[in-house]
Structures are given as structure tokens and as C-alpha cells.
Amino acid sequence: MPELPEVESVKRTLAKKLPKGARWTEVKLLRKNLRVPFPKDLEKELLGTEVEGLERRGKFLIFKRSTKDLLSHLGMSGTWRVLKAEEPLKKHDHLVFGFDHGIRFVYNDPRRFGLVDWGGADSPWLKNLGPEPLTKKFNPEYLYALSRGKKLPVKSFLMNAKVVVGVGNIYASEILFYAGVKPHRKTHSLTKLEVSKIVEETKRVLKVAIQSKGSTLKDYKMVNGKSGSFQNSFRVYSKDGKPCQSCGAKIRSQVLSQRSTYWCPKCQK
């Protein structure tokens, strides 16, 4: 599933191609639903209105408008791409947007686990989300206070969007490796120093991943169709049985909270 670095990369690329004030001239639905049905009033509401900007909240891409914002979540396999002139639509293309300056975007999603829905302050998709990890609100004091009394594994804690947004399975594994913390440790056992290191590495790893345009394992592609490259820098994720690049110990794995989890038995305590 695309995580924060992938969605941020998509947002930045789309924003470069979509000037502020561009108006919707085309809204074409190629099916009735993704994970949830498309809003019934989508075409009526969007046509002729302006895009005031593109933002990201957690794993949601947000088309900002003067009235209702529009949300896009990529789900497991969703991608946005620029639709070139005379380019035919592809299998699993589900939604086309056209704008008055000539650009057209198409949303493709083989597994159809993404969504397009209305946003806003009262949106059920956004209202319970935790802080953005790259902001000052995500800090050691905040995370340590929230971790007290929590018995769940620290990796599950870090992946909870109510705690902090955008950290999924890939980046949680990498962050905890660099922080030196085993993923199955009980959250309440973390010291202040360990929590501080987790916050520090969360910010650093995500920034590096954004610079690398995210990680491409199966489905994720950038808007131009190219792959991200952070997967080439993985230290533990998907490295089960391979030697740790830091100490030589074999990377271990187990299923934790129904997600494959990787760690180094020597570097992480």
C-alpha cells in the first residue's frame, strides 16, 4: 500500500502540472465505485470549479476547493497518471479528470481498494487522524506520553494513524531498525531515549524516502510511470534470512498484527 512518501511524491508531481485556479472541464466515471461508491454528485459538483491547490493528509491526496475538498486514497494499487493526447485508456482505468489548461489525469486501480470521496473538516476519513510526522506536533514528548500503558507491539503502535499518520508496514520496519528497537517490543517498555530516537528516525527515513520518490515493490508508480527507488535502500524490509548490513546477523521475520515484520536480532533491542 502506498504510504506517506509515495502519496507525497504523487502530490508534488500533480501539483507541478496543475496550476492553481485550473478548472475542471471533464469528469468521466468509468465505473460506479472503488472501495466505496463515487459520490453521486461528483460530476455536477466539479465541472467548472477551480482547484485551489493540492495537499496531502496522511495517505490522502486532497484537491483543495472553495467548497468541498475532494479526497483520493490510492488503496493497495492505485495510481494517477497524465493522460496524453490521443492516448487510449487502459484496463483498470476508472476515473478521468480534464482541466481547462489542457491537462488530463486518469486514476487506475487494479484492486479497486482506493477511494475518491468528499473531504472537509467533518470528513469521517480525516477527523480522527493523528499528527503529520514531519511537523513539530510529532515530537518525543507527545509520543512518550501516548505510549504509557500501551501493551501492543511498538510497530503496531507506530502504524496506528490515530498516533501518527502515513507510517505503514515498510517504513515502520525501516524506522525501528534505525532506532534500534525490536518491532515486537511492548510499547509501554520504551524509554524516553528510545522514543526520542524513534521520532528522529521517523522524520529522517520519511524525508529520504520522499527524496527517492517512494518505494516500488509491485504496483506503485509515479505520475510519469516510473518507479520509486527507496526499495534499493531497505535495511530489513523483505530481507528475511539475509545478512544485516551493519552487523552480519541474519535478518528475521514474523507476522505481527497480520503484517510481515522484519528486524535484526543484534542491532535491535
Image (cartoon, helix red, strand yellow):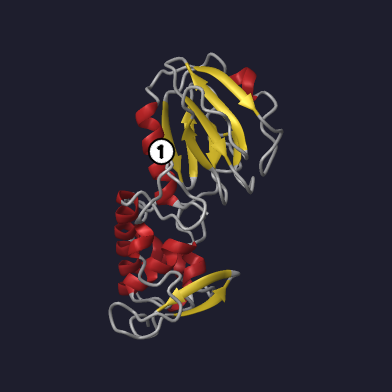
**Quadrant in which residue 114 is drawn:** top right
Q: Nearer the viewer, residue 29 or 191?
A: 29
Number of other residues with Cα within 10 Å of mark 1, as a class: few under 14, some 14 to 19, many 20 or more = few
Query: Which residue position holds label 1?
Result: 224
The answer, for residue 79, to whether it is visible in the render is: yes
User: How many tags in the picture?
Assistant: 1
Q: Nearer the viewer, residue 114 or 143?
A: 114
The residue sitting at 53% across, 13% down in the picture is: 48
**Quadrant in which residue 179 is drawn:** bottom left
Instruction: Work out which quarter of the rendered image holds the C terminus and state it.
Output: bottom left
The residue sitting at 47% across, 22% down in the picture is: 85
Residue 262 in the image: state x and y as whole percent.
46, 74
Q: Is residue 91 above or below residue 246?
A: above
The answer, for residue 131, to whether it is visible in the render is: no
The residue sitting at 50% across, 72% down in the picture is: 261
Residue 118 in the image: state x and y as whole percent.
59, 32
In-image side of 191 versus 72 (left or right): left
Q: Is residue 10 above or below residue 172?
A: above
Q: Is residue 57 above or below residue 263?
A: above
Q: Is residue 100 above or below residue 228?
A: above
Residue 196 in the image: state x and y as whole percent.
31, 67
Residue 22 in the image: state x and y as whole percent.
43, 18
Mark 1 falls on what kind of element?
loop
Q: Nearer the viewer, residue 127 or 250?
A: 250
- Residue type, label 1: Asn
